[in-house]
Image (spheres, coloured by chain):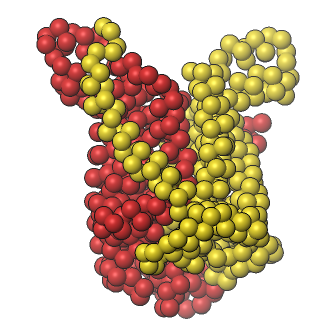
Chain colours: A red, B yellow
Amino acid sequence: MKILQGAVVVLYALFALLPLLWLGITSIKDRDAAISPHAKVIPVLTAPNDPTSVGFVPQLDAFRGLSEVHAGAHASFWEHVTSSVVIGFVSTAASVLLGAACAYGFSRYRIGGAKDWLFFILSTRFMPPLAVVIPVLLMYRKLELPGTHLGLIILYTVFNLSLSVWLMKGFIDEIPKAFEEAAFVDGYTRFDAFWRIIVPQSATGMAVTGVFCLISAWNEYGFAMTLNSSSAVTVPAYFAGLQGNIEGMPWPQVAAGALVFVAPVAVLTFLVRKHLLRGVTFGTIKQ
Amino acid sequence: MERSRGGLGRFAFVGPTLVLLIAFNLFPLLYNVVLSFTNAELVGDGWKWIGGRNYERVFTDARFGAAVRRTAWFVFCAVGLELGIGFATALALQAFTRVRAVLVTALLIPMMLSPAVMGLFWNLILNGNHGITNQTLDALSLPQPQWLTDREWKLFSVILIDVWMWTPFLMLISMAGLAAIPKTLYEAAEVDRASRWTVFRRVTLPLVAPYLGLAVLLRFTDALKQFDLVMATQGPNDTSTQTLSTLLYQVTFRDGKVGLGSAYACVILVLVIALATVFTRYLETIQRRTA
C-alpha cells in the first residue's frame, strides 16, 4: 500500500513541478536552444559539438532582454511589471479596507437580510468577467477610464470585495466582543473601536486577505486585456499580446519574464501556507 | 451589548462595499439587458432598438449550441480529472506525514499562478516539434500527438493545462476533509475487523464527501468561465476549443457586435446565475456540515 501511495505522490509531483522546472531551464537558454528539435535539458559549461546533445550553455541574456521592447508591444516587460504592481497593490489595499469594514458591520450589527446580502456579495464572484465587460467598457468610455491604472484599480477592488468580505468576516467573528465592550465603557465610538481594536486585532487576517486579493489582481487577464490594451497594460495582457508576433515568440525572455512574474506569488503562497485552505474556500473551511 | 446601536453607523461600515458592488456589478448587468435589445456596435455611438432580434440570432447560431456543449464537456472532464487525481493524491499523501508540509506547499504552487502567463508557456511545452513533451515521448518511442494543432487534441490540451493548474485545489480541500475525520472512527473499525475497502466506503468517503462537494462546487463555477487558457493556447476564434467566454469575446471584440454580444452575455448570465444560486444555497448546507 505504501509503495502504491509513494508512486502516486511521485508521479503527481513530477506532473505538478516539471513544468515549473522547465520554465526555469528555458529562462537560461538562448533562443536556438529553447526551440531546438533536440531536447536541451542539462546546462553544461562548454558548447557541445554534437547538435543532438542534451547539453546547452546556460546564460542570463533572457533576463537582460526583459528591458527590450519586443515586436508587437509598446513597452518593455519592466514597465508592465510597474503597472501590475501599482494596480495590484492599490486595489488590494482598497479591497481589504472596505472588506474589513463591511465584514465588521455584518459581524457586529444586526442587519436585515444579512444572509442574503452576504450571498449577494459572494455571487458577484461567480459572474464571468466577460459578461459584464461590455457595459463596464461603455461606462468607462464616458468616464475616460479605459487604458488607465485607475480603471483597473476600481474593477479589481470591486472584484475582490467578495473574497475580502467573506475572509475578513471569518477573522473578525473570531475576535471576542469583550474587547470592544471594554472600550465602549471607556467612551470609544464604533469607529474608534474599529480602528483601534479590530484593525490591529485582525492584522494577520488582513495580511492573509491582502495576499489573496493581490494574487487574484496580479493574475487577472479578462478585464485587463479588454480594457487596457494599449496603455497601463498589466503583465498577463502584455504576454498574451506577444502571441502572433512576426519574429516568433522570444521563448527565453517569455520564460524569464514569467519566472520573475510568478516567483513573488510562489513566495507569498509559502508565507500564507497555513491559511491557504481558508483563502481558496472564501473562509468556508477554517483550519 | 446590543448589536444594533446606531442605524447610520452600520451603513457607514457596510454601505461603501454594497454601493460599489451595485455600481460595478448590478448596474452593468442591467445595462447589459438594455444593450441586448439594441444594435449597438463597438465603434460609433448611435444605436437603435431592434427588439428581440439579437436573441433570435443567439438561439439560431450554431456556434452558441456548440459552445454550450463544449463548455459543459470541458467542465465535466476538467473537474472530474481534478477531483480524481486530487483526491487520490491526498489519500496517497497520508502515508508521508513527515515530509508532507513542505512538499504540499510546493505542490500547491500551480493554482496560485497566472493562467494567462502559464498557459502561454504551456504552448512551448506542448509544441509538436520542439516541445519537451513530444521529445520525451519520442525518446520513449511512444506516439506523439500534435497537442496544439490537431483538432482531436486541442481541447484535451486545454483540459490538461487546467488539470495541471487546479488539481492542487482539490488536493488541498481533500486533505482538509481527511484530516477532519476523527481517529476514533478508524480505531473502532479496526476493532470490528472491517476490511480496508469497507472502512474507505463507510467511514472515509461519507465524511470527506461534503468537503469534496464544496471543492467541486467552487471549481465548477470557475471552470464554467474558462477564458484565459483557451485564449493563451488557441485564441478566441478556434472552432474546436471555443468556450462560452471566448465566443462572447469573439462576438463583442472581434466582430464588434456589442448588442449581439450583450444578448449572449445575458443568456450566459442566466445560466451561470441559475447554477450559482443552486450552489450558494448548497454551500450553506456544506458550511454547516464542515464546521
Q: Position of residue B266 (x, y in %)?
A: 60, 56
Q: Horizontally, is B92 left or right of A56 in the view?
A: right
Residue A101 placement, left or right of B90 = left
In the image, what residue occupies the spot 74% across and 45% down?
B84
Q: Between residues B49 and A15, which one lies in front from this camera angle?
A: B49
Where is A82 relative to A121, above or below? below
> Which residue is located at x 31 percent, y 29 percent?
B11
In depth, the one of B113 and B42 nearer the eye is B42
- State whether residue B178 appears in this view: no
User: Which quarter of the rendered picture does the N terminus of chain B lie within?
Assistant: top left
* Rendering coords of residue B237 (x, y %): 64, 76
Quarter holding residue A194 = top left
The spot of residue A15 in percent (x, y) is 64, 57
Above or below for A70 versus A107: below
Residue drawn at x 81%, y 22% as measured from the top left: B202
Give the quadrant of the C terminus of chain B: top right
